Image (cartoon, grey):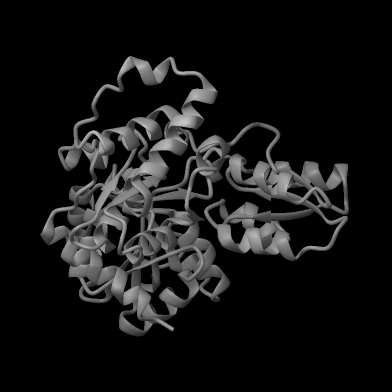
Amino acid sequence: MMAMDLLGYVDMEMPEQYRTMGSEELDARIRSAKERLGKDLVILGHHYQRDDVIKFADFRGDSLRLARIGSEQKEAKYIIFCGVHFMAETADTLAQDEQLVILPDLRAGCSMADMADIEEVEEAWEVLQEEFGDTIIPVTYVNSTAAIKAFVGRHGGTTCTSSNAHLVLEWAFKQKKRILFLPDQHLGRNTAYKMGIPLEQMVIWNPQSGQFEENKGSLQDTRMILWKGHCSVHQKFTPEQIHRIRKQDPEMKVIVHPECSFEVVQLADQAGSTDYIIKTIEAAPPGSKWAIGTEVNLVHRLAEEHPEQKIVLLSTTMCPCLTMNRIDRPHLLWALESILEGRPIHRIEVDEETKKWSKVALDRMLSLK
């Protein structure tokens, strides 16, 4: 079930005028609405957002950075988040009380975040407590619902990003012997393995079957309990693609996101967060050749911004984040003009109890150095 269903959000039908509007009129009216709203508005655009939308963003970045930036724009009454649902929830969690967070299209969810349902997590926690006792601390990737972040906060855990996962896991292992890592198994596995934890000390928890999977060692030796979740985009990159690209051009360097599978990360020349990938390309010398394993909008944007390098998508097929791409110009314009008309649509509002514990989890992470 989608997070928006759980929280009772209702997606309104976009008026037909926005669906049939031409490209030039869309751009002109978006610019006009931004100008009229002035400092009352800030538009946040995630790195994976489509080009025709992100060009209107006041700030670009990953989900957590944008959420923090939104809260820092104290003059802005309205935060429009061009991303997906969990990102807007995080923005609302960190926003000032008087700020309204708006997601232009409520259908912009995240399949990974939806793979960790709060009821399934609570049921799993009971089973894991019976099996391992009070030896587990929960850690959730920020790509998770506010309800999951709140669960982690209540149970002494914290959140992490793909940039600071190593730091967070080091902290977590100082608290307890074992970590329950939500909801992306690949980021958890890749980070723990890089820290020296063998695969034999990792197991997958399958919420559908209520059982452990891939238990290659003794269950009692387990250090990492990986929730069976993944990113539908990064799951599409394969070892075969890396072998193919290197056979075609041995000078091509492969850089991938740690949400990719263990086998892909091990074969790649480098692996790191979205910001890490961007900074690596920015620092690379002219003539460099890169095959990048991450979302296609970002890869194409990097290729356009760095024509002095050869930059290609690792996969031969398009790998867009389909839910992220639901945020388009018609929905953005509709959201802007609804504010001007005094009836903002698609407000994302996390309830106070969930917000409280979700913020506890986020603040624990932000306090780590």
Please, is residue 71 above or below residue 167 in the view? above
Left or right: residue 182 compared with residue 314: left
Furthest residue to the front? 36
| Residue 277 horizontal/vertical position (percent) | 64, 59
Number of disc labels? 0
Residue 323 in view (yes/no): no
x 25%, y 47%: residue? 117
> If the image is split into quadrants, where does the C terminus sit?
bottom left
Residue 215 in view (yes/no): yes
* 275 or 2: nearer the viewer: 275
Please, is residue 13 above or below residue 138 in the view? above
| Residue 84 horizontal/vertical position (percent) | 38, 44
* 163 or 57: nearer the viewer: 57
> If the image is split into quadrants, where does the N terminus sit?
top left
x 38%, y 21%: residue? 18
| Residue 268 horizontal/vertical position (percent) | 70, 57
- The image quadrant that residue 74 belongs to is bottom left
Left or right: residue 244 compared with residue 11: right
Left or right: residue 51 compared with residue 137: right
x 66%, y 31%: residue? 317
- The image quadrant that residue 333 belongs to is top left
Please, is residue 31 above or below residue 271 in the view? above
| Residue 359 horizontal/vertical position (percent) | 24, 67
* 137 or 199: nearer the viewer: 137
